[in-house]
Amino acid sequence: MEEKFNRLVFIPIAAVLFLMVGYQYVCPADSNTCYFRSDEKGLFQRYSSGFELVYTEADEDLPSKITSKFNFTERDLDRHVDFSIRGDDVMVFLHIQKTGGTTFGRHLVKNIQLEQPCDCMPGQRKCTCHRPGRAESWLFSRFSTGWSCGLHADWTELTSCVPVVMNKRDKKSAQKNKRNFYYITMLRDPVSRYLSEWKHVQRGATWKTALHMCDGRPPTQDELPACYSGEDWTGVPLADFMSCPSNLANNRQVRMLADLSLVGCYNMSTVSELERGRVLLASAKANLRNMAFYGLTEFQRKTQYLFERTFGLRFIRAFTQINSTRAASVGISEKVRWRIEGLNALDVELYEYAKELFLQRYQYNRQRQHREERLRRWRERQQRQRLHRTYLAEMWRLGGGGGGGGGAGPGEEEQAKGLEEVATTEDYSSQVVRW
């Protein structure tokens, strides 16, 4: 009689424990899964029409639904690189002037969590970025290999120069060693970038040592005449800066990302100006879209996030958004702004394209990451529930429920059936995942 009473008491206690533990699986303490306040704000919001991901940042607003002007495929949005830092892969940074490339370049050599961090000696501009256990560089950039292909080399120069330089540095044969070169870059709002370059040139910058190699030769003086006489263009007014037709600041981002050999390099007589612009813009868009990664100066945190997702690397410190730049301090009229936009019409269209692709890639990756996290939590719950059911079965057996001592009475069978139904319902509901 006493043994039967103990078994009857054990069943409801076990059922209560099961429900309490099950609730913790579905609604963990550090989760908002079962938090029903409608006025709470967070990274993710749930709508009655289903589950939709909305990500917002305090300093960088991203609309929940981006109005798409371009037809990007899933392949365009899904950028993931199996970058082998221990193998022969090389990351190539195409540094466009006044796009925040110096800051990003320093992140690459000083701020990435690596098995063998780059060796940056005080007082030296270049760092040694070797692969683990090998005296070979995995990074081609200003702060690692220097300007090995020329000062601020563009896409046309880098794609023909980098493989030769890196194979020579590492003493490798191009025929025997097929290497992956992953190109990355940074872009910036064209008007801000143009004004920043003007202020930089006004302070004495020239970049006159840049090679501008294309089809095996630099441009002639007739093909690329100088905008100034003398050593530099110090103190140049904005009006004069805009008036030089051969100023490389005009549409610089398109020119540096396009394949210049498609339009006869710097020879303007090969095709009409309209056709030249159309070909260069199409080439720049294609090259940018097919690059392993690019970031936008105006979206530092999103740039960091997409780089980490693309390469599977992590930065040590978070990127910071700095809006108080020299370009931001320049006050210009609407007429001057329109003039700058006209001079940089190709860059304006490229940036519009790049910005939409960038934000769509960001939203795609956030949604994918959230699905991965939900799936991981669901699998963990499944595993915990299996272990818990095994534990309950063992407790039931030790309590006499599974013994052969005379069998269970009618009341005990009903309670055991009820407990089994509770377990089955919990097991089924935990498998329903709404995406």
Image (spheres, rainbow, N blue to C red):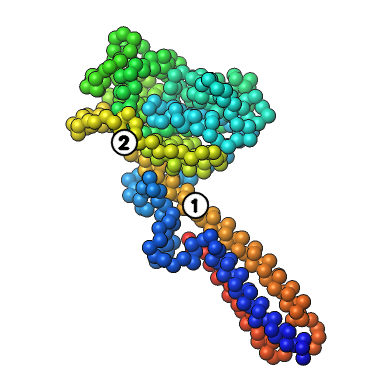
At numbered mark 1, what does the secondary structure look like: helix, strand or loop?
helix
| Residue identifier under label 2 | 349
Residue drawn at x 39%, y 25% is: 97
Q: Label 2: how many residues lie within 10 Å, few (<14), some (14-19) or many (20+)?
A: some
| Residue identifier under label 1 | 368
Q: Quadrant of residue 45?
A: bottom left
Question: Residue 53: x and y, percent?
Answer: 43, 56
- Residue 253 visible to the viewer: yes
User: Which numbered disc, 2 or 1, marks the residue closer to the eye?
Assistant: 1
Residue drawn at x 30%, y 23% is: 198
Answer left or right for 49 relative to 382: left
Instruction: Name the kind of residue labelled 1 in the image.
Output: Arg
Residue drawn at x 64%, y 78% is: 15
Q: Quadrant of residue 233?
A: top left
Q: Is 233 drawn above or below residue 376 in the view shown? A: above
At numbered mark 2, what does the secondary structure look like: helix, strand or loop?
helix
